[in-house]
Image (cartoon, rainbow, N blue to C red):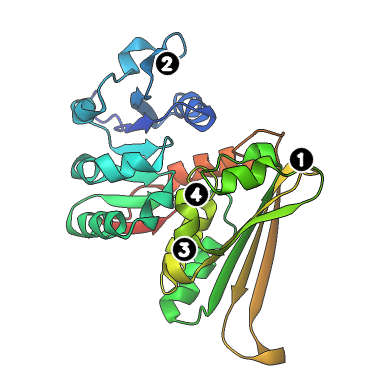
Amino acid sequence: MISGEKKKRRVGVVGFGHLGQFLVREIQKIEDYELSFVWNRTSTALKGKVDDKYILEDLHSFAERTPDLIIEVAHPSITADYGETFLDVADYMIGSPTAFANLDVENKLRKKASSGRHGIYIPSGALWGGPDIKKMADRGTLQGLKVTMKKHPSCYKLNEPLKTRNDQVKSDAVVLYDGCIRDLCPLAPNNVNTMAAAALAAHNLGFDKTQGCIVADPSLEAHIVEVDVIGPGQNENLFTVKTIRHNPAVPGAVTGNATYASFLSSMLGAHSQGPGLHLC
């Protein structure tokens, strides 16, 4: 690096699905950023799409690429298997925060992030009002939180028993699940990262007291996320906030159109907050 030249922030991308491909393209357009590496479970998917010099064949050797930030957009198992070692080297942005539904994983990662030099960053994704939810949780005024997600059935990637329920949806909207988020995350690890982010923001409620509901609606050409917040008071004096996010998405799309830009903005904000867990 030439003396006086600003050091670029080196970003490693773990996962090369639609969101990973988007991030790889965008990182290479940003003046102050550069790719450190790109890893995918099947490396052949990268050939011809990513310059060979960026392809990381073995994720265990990630540290050799000296990343400043590692972004996971693959699967929650990545955080369980590599999260602690990632934090030894770089800041870590977790695109699949459903990993934290496993209490052991959450405790280990929080401890690691609070004791080292690097932080964990949780992107807001499709969650609207995350910082406000966290402020209420910080003050202890958050009394209840429910996130409802409505999508076309083809937009869900579910495990049993929800998969069978979803496959049986024909013409009418069907509630597939309505209950605590901790139990939902293992059943829909690819679809409810927004809910996991909400549970992390609502830290006084957490995954056990934050509620989640997913609805399969064949009439939809959008991902709809409703966030219901309950604060202090009672009856007609109860504090409530309801937001509805309508994100256009073609049938079969796991990630809605607007979430890509949101994720990129989160990446640009995932720095300089030090140790600990941060929303971005």
- Whether the residues at callouts 1 and 3 have beta carbons within 8 Å, the answer is no
Would you say 29 lies left or right of 99 here? right
Q: What residue type is labelled 1?
A: Glu
Percent of width and height locating residue 86: 24, 40
Q: In the structure shown, which secondary structural element does the residue marked by tag 4 occupy?
A: helix
Indicate which label's residue lies in the foreground, 3 or 4. 4
Q: How far apart are marks 1 and 4 (CA)?
A: 23 Å
Q: What residue type is labelled 3?
A: Ala
Residue at 50% across, 24% down: 25
The dot on residue 221 is 1
Q: Earlier in the sequence, mark 2 or mark 1?
A: 2
Quadrant in the picture for residue 276? bottom left
Q: What residue type is labelled 2?
A: Leu
Residue linked to disc 4: 187
Residue linked to disc 2: 46
Q: Which of marks 3 and 2 is nearer the N terminus?
A: 2
Q: Which of marks 4 and 2 is nearer the N terminus?
A: 2
The dot on residue 213 is none
